[in-house]
Image (cartoon, grey):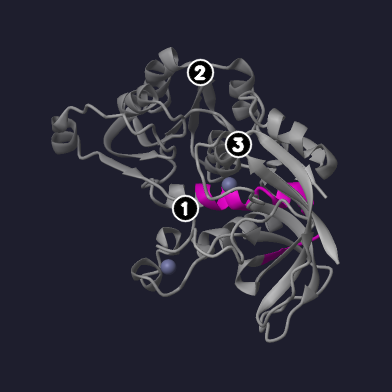
Amino acid sequence: MSILAVAIEEPGRVALVQRPRKELWPGSVRVRVQACGICTLEKRIYSGALNLGYPIVAGHEVGGVIEEVGPQVLGDFRPGQRVALDLLTRCGQCHWCRRGHTNRCENRFMGRNGMLGGLSQEAVVPAREVFVLPETVAPTVATLAEPLADCLHCLARAGLNHQDPVAVVGLGVMGQLHAALLAHLGHATLGVDPLAAKRQLALDLGARAAVVPAEAPQAMQELSRGYGASSVIVTAPQAEALDLGLSLLGKGGTLVTYSSYGAEERLSLDLNRLHYQEITLTGTEGRTELDFERAVGLLAAGSLDISRLVSRTYPASQAAQAFQAAQDPELYRVVVTF
Ligand SMILES: [Zn+2]
Ligand SMILES: [Zn+2]
């Protein structure tokens, strides 16, 4: 018996293919995929910027329903439960996993069992990658559990202090998710983006103010009574965005770069800001399963509405159009449904 999957055959070419149905193994769960988002990772495989070998069935932002529970699964998993999947290998054995930093696992891209493969009618994955959600969470929204977990990991590194003002530079899907989360946590949030539609959505999601980059320093001064941001999240992958973020940061503040940068990008920084102003610069990488658990808890609670971040859905038969649409920088998540 075979199942349908969306394969990236080579850079720029997506096709619907038949794949053999996987057997359950001890400790695994079979999930019928209902929706899978096209994230930056998939876009990079599609563009050729990231080569994990072609053809590849990518996809790691999955909402679905449990179809079958394998032998020796110890957790409370039952057929019919709505789930989100954390499709990443965490070996549990390397230096970082042993210290609880499973987001840094040295083997996270090794072994295809349970890593990616979400753009498929079915996924058979280790039970530890399966997170149960209430039925009230739509499968398309469940796909956002993974990016939400990434944001929670980022915010844990952002030195959030009381409800001090925070800036989010860049209001793509990750910037919007950060802005929504920060508002949910009660922070006065300044969204920064050149595009008016993106600023409006940040306001709708709870940001206190949203401005174009040139107006951001003044707006942050006003929002913070002159003290500057206590935390800045930079989600735009340009060095200028990082420079702007630094200019918004107050004494003792923390700036987190969420994006990856081109290999040539360098930062020039007045080192006395580190010294006299006690600022912290850091980055964030992925999420741990604990972050994922927290993200799922937030979605389950139902008080954070991020459904507007799914811009479009395409049936798997139109996956090629979905990958085309995902290139549009004005859209947020594009989701493929099965
Ligand atoms: Zn993702
Ligand atoms: Zn590991």
Q: Which mark is residue 11?
A: 3
Let me know if residue 32 appears in the view: no
Residue found at x 65% / y 80%: 27
Query: Can you tell me whether the CB of the residue at mark 1 lies under 8 Å from the nearest atom of ligand 1?
Result: no
Relative to residue 306, is residue 228 drawn left or right? left
Q: Quadrant of residue 204?
A: top right
Dot 3: element? loop
User: Quick check: marks 1 and 3 in contact, CB under 8 Å?
Assistant: no
Nearest to N terminus: mark 1 or mark 3: 3
Q: Residue at x 55, y 38 (%)?
A: 44
Report the residue at 75% width, 35% height from top. 320
Counting every numbered tag in the picture gives 3
The residue segment tinted magenta is 131-151
- Given the image, on which type of amino acid does mark 1 rest? His
| Secondary element type, mark 1 | helix
Asked if 42 appears above or below 34 in the picture, the reply is above
Q: Is residue 310 visible?
A: yes
Whether disc 2's CB lies below 8 Å from ligand 1 is answered no
Real-space CA distance between mark 1 and mark 3, rounded to the nearest whole angstrom: 31 Å
Residue linked to disc 1: 153
Q: Which residue is mark 2?
A: 211
Mark 2 is surrounded, within 10 Å at the Cα level, by few (under 14), some (14 to 19) or many (20 or more) other residues, namely many
Verify whether residue 116 appears in magenta.
no
Residue 143 included in the magenta stretch of the image? yes
